[in-house]
Image (tube, helix red, strand yellow):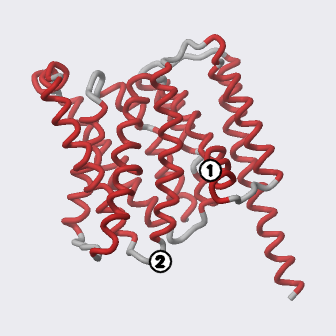
Amino acid sequence: MNVMLAMLAAFLWGTTYAVTQYSLPGWPPLLLGAIRALPAGLLLLAFKPSMPEAKYWPILVRLGSINIALFFGLLFIMAQTLPSAISGVGMVSLPVFAMFYYWLLHKKKPSKIQFISGMTLITLAWLLFDPLNLTLNPVGLIAMIAALASIVVGSNIIQGLKGKMHWWSVLCWQLIIGGSILTIIAFAHALSAPTQYLSVLQNFTSLNAMGLIWLVLLNTMLAYGLYVWLMTRMTVVEFTFAGISNPVAGILMGLILVGDQFTLNQYLLMALIIATSLIGSLLSTYYERKKLKESKSSH
């Protein structure tokens, strides 16, 4: 049941890119990030009020800044500049970033399977994105790399709060803090460059409203709430396995909503990237459990 819920959360996240392109084209990324985060955090807090202890505020500010403000801003830059399928598949490389992050900064050496899987993902991603003949928006690709890095750093901060704060407080307050930061920055940006923001207000449609409802209620309140709740009930490896539905949603929704079209070779590379991520996670889980059983039997 937990795996199915995790797959639902990841699938909803994978719809972000196509839903944004289809229902909110041309909207400023900062405004989209603020609208997605702050109302969701306030609604969740109203549903179940929670006030953290004073000593946790500095950590929550860092978490909200990195995990929400920075990540959401970058996410919507990706959504406005890259095809939905490319964004979804690109996010599959998150385990590679995590592997190098913990290896370089925490001296946690990856297993052989993790290393081989990571190198394979890098090779396939190079072939898919083809930097030597780049036709994708470089701003979107830079935003993708920065977004991956922010997820890894933000997840590391969340790990530090595990067992210290209730998951509901972590969920609500990182959304409120991150959303508030994005709101302030978006307001300052609107004052300096009002044209895009005025256009959004003057041309607001029911389709825009539906897109915002999807992002706030489903992609954030439901999916993000499931994610934080599931992190107290399943391992990161198990959730990574379920995260395979993210690029699937990106590819399907990109095809259905915005008509993304790719060559057969590109679709094959996307499938290989998804398969590599899936097989790597399954093998890692298998050998970790095997080692655990062997250590228990030896005692």
What residue appears at the point 79 percent right and 62 percent down from the top-left corner? Answer: 286
List the single residue furthest toward the left.
202
Other residues around mark 1 within 10 Å, as few (<14) / some (14–19) / many (≥20): some
Considering only vertical position in the picture, is 32 above or below 195? below
What residue appears at the point 81 percent right and 63 percent down from the top-left corner? Answer: 287
The number of numbered badges drawn on the structure is 2
Q: Nearer the viewer, residue 252 or 203?
A: 203
Q: Amino acid at mark 1?
A: Tyr
Q: Nearer the viewer, residue 63 or 37?
A: 63
Mark 1 residue element:
helix
Residue 24 occupies quadrant: top left
The image's mark for residue 163 is: 2
Q: Which residue is mark 1?
A: 101
N-term-proximal mark, 1 vs 2: 1
Relative placement, left or right, of 290 versus 163 is right
Decide: marks 1, 2 in contact (CB < 8 A)?
no
Q: Nearer the viewer, mark 1 or mark 2?
A: 1
The spot of residue 243 in percent (x, y) is 57, 49
The spot of residue 141 in percent (x, y) is 51, 26
Q: Amino acid at mark 2?
A: Gly
